[in-house]
Amino acid sequence: MAQAAARARDAQATIGDSEFDRDTAVTLREKGVYDAELSAGWTIIQAVNGGYLLAMLGRALSDALPHSDPFSVSAHYLRASSPGPAVIRTQTVRTGRTLSTGQASLFQYAEDGTEVERIRVLATYGDLDGLTDEVRTSAEPPAIPPREDCLGPGDGPAPIPGSSAITERLDIKLDPATVGWAVGAPSGKGEMRGWFGLADGRDPDPFSLLLTVDALPPTAFELGLKGWTPTIELTTHIRCRPAPGPLRVSITTRNLAGGFLEEDADVWDSAGRLVAQSRQLARAPRG
């Protein structure tokens, strides 16, 4: 049994050689222009996941800018994206010694062949390895039961109709206190907590953190609403390079009003460090 476990560890995907890396890859066509293919494997309900798209745009900007690590990435989702070909156009806004800023837009093609903008991003990049070790924080990792005591997609009924392809690529185990929605008993607290990783065992890196902040079920489910919760705007801060191993994710909503809600996410690595934070504005489900 020990030998089988060792073989499984050896066979796990690695950073740079995984389905996530292949599916978020971009190909330079000419300066500032990248071709991409949006994979159907990262769809949920009726659209390509916003965090997956953010990671793809993040890769294009990493290649286009003189600094390679995302520090702050703000995205406006203009229209839902569909699996298929896309083009990403980037522009350098400013470059400095330690930081550089750029913008990028992802386009897909209409039936008549014209480009339709789906997402627009403004981002600042730097060198995560150049950050100091000083930490002054009152933030604490969320209290989540051990992974073996948490619940995954196979432990309950499918909550909503439509594509769930992305769940096959993620290893999510949710805190039982935040899954009342799955059995028709939402808590009403607007909280979602759980363990997160990629299903193929690939360790986290700054680009997969852009996926992580938008990968758990919407907090709207625990508010008693089910259905598509489309992101309007998402800002993510990458605070440091994550250590190998599973991540702990906590997402909260404090205010649903006028048909919109915010989601605040904190992501902690296996070393107990706060490695990513985000806030997004989303449209509340109508169900």
Image (spheres, helix red, strand yellow):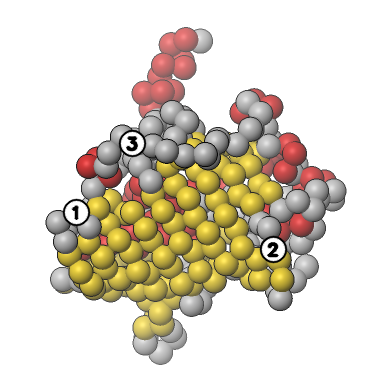
Q: Residues within 10 Å of mark 2 (few under 14, many from 20)?
A: few
Give yes or no for contact between labels 2 and 3 (Cβ–Cβ under 8 Å).
Answer: no
In the image, taking residue 88 as reference, residue 211 lies left or right, namely right
Tell me the element at label 1. loop
Q: Circle 1 sits on which residue?
A: 98
Q: Which mark is residue 255?
A: 2
Which of these two is toward me, 123 or 158?
123
Q: Position of residue 228 (x, y in %)?
A: 66, 65
State the image coordinates of residue 100 (x, y, percent, origin top left).
22, 61
The numbered dot on residue 134 is 3
Determine which quarter of the picture holds residue 11: top left
Labels 3 and 1: the sequence-earlier one: 1
* Near-viewer residue (134 or 241): 134
From the viewer's perspective, is the residue at label 2 or at label 3 nearer?
A: 3
* Numbered disc in front, either 3 or 1: 3
Residue flagged by tag 1: what amino acid is it? Thr
Q: Secondary structure at mark 2?
A: loop
